[in-house]
Image (cartoon, rainbow, N blue to C red):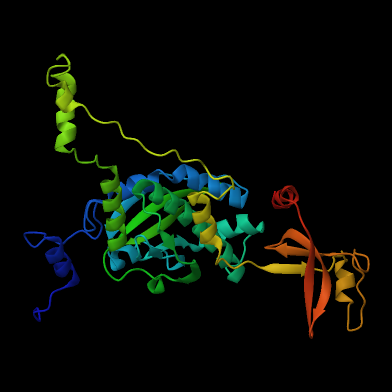
Amino acid sequence: MSDGALSQAEIDALLGGAGGGAAAAPKNAASGGAGDISALKDCLNGTLDAQSSNVSAMTGSEVKFGALSLSSSTRDAFLAELPDTVTSVKIDFTSGFPGEHIFLMSEDTAKAIASLMNKEENPALDEMAMSVIGEVISQMTGTEITALTNKTGNKSIASASPEAANVAKATAPLPSDTFVTAEYDLFLGAGTHKIWEIFGTQTASGIAAAIRAASAPPPQSPTQGMGGVGGGAMGGMGAGGFGGVFTQTPGVQPVQFPGLTPALSQREQGNIGLLMDVFMEMTVELGRTRKLIKEILSMGEGTIIELDKLAGEPVDILVNHVPIAKGEVVVIDENFGVRVTEIVSPAERMGDIG
């Protein structure tokens, strides 16, 4: 006996306009609840080669993004497809098309990415792993922003710093209402994985509308229409005819010389700006040594460990375990510090990464 309250399925059916009491499908085509968002799908598909190349360079391994599928979904319907625990990276758009923007992946996918980035087997999904995964997602978002800027002409598109966490799927930061999901096949090393990209409905619809508006042909003015007629039908008339009526004055613009000082392109500025708030681990290494396990177990208070560096030799400065500079130890008040004395060349840094 019903108490008069509508079930969730009945509410979905009413909102979706379903007739005859049929329940609305939880997932709709790309032209469903969020409006016609096929333009967004085309734009994302156009970035797949660049995404594959960029992530391959970051991980040092072959990575390929397969063709994506785009759909509209509700929170409950989408959660039913996810594993119990997921790694989420919240990286909302803050301007241009402001709104919710999240990436989700399984724990296995997160570990596979962290393993390639940190060069270690079966890594723990700790703060360091979340940092490198957030860095990968930030790079992916930067690639998308560059493509969207080129497609729409909107140069104000920007995103927040990534917030990565490994959480139970019920606490994933998904939008509360209907949203748009892009599902990617990710070929990572020898395994195949999936990554989901979530757009808030307003953001997805705004992006799709801007792409369509930018690609639409400009409206033709009446003068332009007459010019076309005059050039054809009146073209055979002599100078004394009506040819002069349709003569157009050529446009004249002042010459613009390029600047003499080099400047970053809009794309380079946008990509660098995305990374400014990313946290990196900086380490100062005094020296290293190798010991047998029995020597390590015999260590106690007062044991002196001889390092592979001479007294006064510069110490190494590393970022995410990659040497970037050398320096000398200084004392600032009661704290130790390092004064940078030498920057490692880009060629040496690339050699260390490889």
Classify residue 286 by image quadrant. Answer: bottom right
Q: How many marks?
A: 0
Q: Is residue 96 left or right of residue 87?
A: left
Please say if 3 is above or below 283: below
Classify residue 116 by image quadrant. Answer: bottom right
Q: Is residue 241 left or right of residue 316?
A: left
Can residue 109 be seen?
no
Query: What residue do we see at 11% from left, 59% from top?
Result: 18
Q: Nearer the viewer, residue 250 or 90?
A: 250
Please say if 90 is above or below 188: below
Q: Is residue 191 left or right of residue 290?
A: left
Q: Nearer the viewer, residue 240 or 87?
A: 240
Please say if 327 is above or below 151: below
What percent of the width, then of the height, locates residue 182? 36, 54
Residue lying farthest to the front in this orientation: 240
What percent of the width, then of the height, locates residue 163? 49, 69
Query: What residue do we see at 7% from left, 59% from top?
Result: 19
Q: Say which quadrant the N terminus sits in.
A: bottom left
Q: Nearer the viewer, residue 3 or 349?
A: 349
Can residue 264 be seen?
yes
What percent of the width, then of the height, locates residue 77? 29, 64
Q: Nearer the viewer, residue 244 or 3?
A: 244
What percent of the width, then of the height, locates residue 72? 27, 57
Q: Is residue 81 left or right of residue 233?
A: right
Please say if 60 is above or below 202: above
